[in-house]
Image (cartoon, coloured by chain):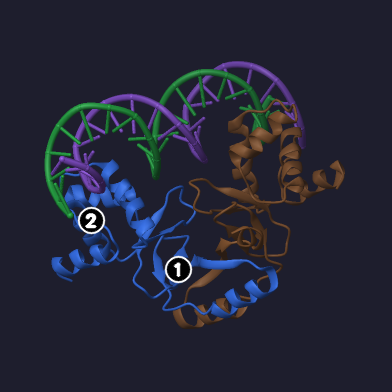
Chain colours: A blue, B brown, C purple, D green
Amino acid sequence: MTADTSHILLKRYSVQPTAHRLAILSVFRDATAPLDGQTVYEILLRQGAGIDRATVFRTLKTFERAGLVQPLEFNEGKVRFELNRGMHHHHLVCTECGSIQCLKQCELDGMVESIKRETGFSASFHRLDFFGTCAKCRKEE
Amino acid sequence: MTADTSHILLKRYSVQPTAHRLAILSVFRDATAPLDGQTVYEILLRQGAGIDRATVFRTLKTFERAGLVQPLEFNEGKVRFELNRGMHHHHLVCTECGSIQCLKQCELDGMVESIKRETGFSASFHRLDFFGTCAKCRKEE
DNA sequence: TTTAATGCAAAACCTTTGCACATCA
DNA sequence: TGATGTGCAAAGGTTTTGCATTAAA
């Protein structure tokens, strides 16, 4: 991913592409798991970016409202975010090592339909996360 | 539900049944939606119970560890809990009025199986919550 | 020039913790 | 008595906010 595509991506989501926002977006593009605000802030500091924590949190809210990232909660007392890469999916959260894997896709469209039919509730999005023990931790026991 | 059955319930979960814990349990039994610690605390104060906030939060952790309640997160910056009434289920969270309904049951056992087969991840529990607009709010628009 | 983004400092909010005292087994 | 629960006060961690300054459209 070049800086150019990041620039275009922000514009597509109607987010003004500043240097800080491009940097934050880049952190998410490099990430292998959803990140919380404090972690994003620390990564940027380590990269030598002079940025304020408040800016990071404000930007995450901006990204969220724009639909660029999705908030996730894994029972940690904080909110993580992940890039909205088009393909909606779910997570496997290992309660031993803390690793978070993504499932390839979501198979709940039928469920959304039947909920609407039966309850009148119109679900615009959903979250499905599995908590348990990952393959690696299972072997180690 | 009598006070007696609450007493027995706590013992069954190996939780020492004190007056405060019975009161907190009773709040959950009367609740129609999952509750966060601060709300439980305020309900108890309104009922005239002299209890400390720390005791409420400590008790919720105790209940959670004992398996008596389940923690839930709905993107609110706080944790809600609901009584573990045996029947595992999911939620419909209205993003307009904030109401939370429960679905009758869960149909994801097959998915848990296929995840284990395909990824080796052993899911001991999961969370599935739908966010959108409830029937009432849809009509009002 | 007019609007939006940022840094700084402070605060808000939810939650946890240390310690002394009270209560239960 | 010995272990556990509780109140009080303080602090921890995450996130938000007001305001002056800076940068962008």
Mark 2 — residue? A16
**Secondary element type, mark 1:** strand
Chain letter of mark 2 equals A
Percent across and percent down for residue B36 are: 60, 44
- Left or right of residue C12, residue B111 in this image: right
Residue A44 visible within the image: yes
Which of disc 2 and disc 1 is earlier in sequence? Answer: 2
The residue that disc 1 covers is A91
Please check whether the numbered discs 1 and 2 fall on a single chain: yes
Is residue B74 toward the left or the right of residue A98 in the image? Answer: right
In front: B118, or B43?
B43
* Along the viewing direction, whichever of B115 and A69 lies nearer the viewer: A69
Label 2 environment density (alpha carbons within 10 Å; few <14, some 14–19, many ≥20):
few
Residue kind at label 2, given as amino acid type: Gln
Q: Residue at x 56, y 54 (%)?
A: B96
| In-image side of B17 versus A120 (left or right) | right
Residue B126, position in %: x, y? 56, 66
Q: Is residue B17 visible?
A: no
Spatial CA distance of label 1 from label 2 is 30 Å
B32 horizontally vs B108: left or right: right
Residue name at image x 33 percent, y 57 percent: A63
Badge 1: chain ID: A
Q: Position of residue B42 (x, y in %)?
A: 65, 33
Q: What's the residue at 58%, 61% (across, down)?
A: B133
Please name whichever residue, B107 or D16, is drawn nearer the observer in this view of the structure. Answer: D16
Q: Image height check: is A11 above or below B2? A: below
Secondary element under disc 2, as helix, strand or loop, is: loop
Q: Residue at x 59, y 51 (%)?
A: B98
Q: Position of residue D16 (x, y in %)?
A: 40, 40
Q: Is residue A24 above or below residue B37?
A: below
In the picture shown, does residue A46 fall above or below A140?
Answer: above
Question: Which quadrant of the figure has residue A114?
Answer: bottom right
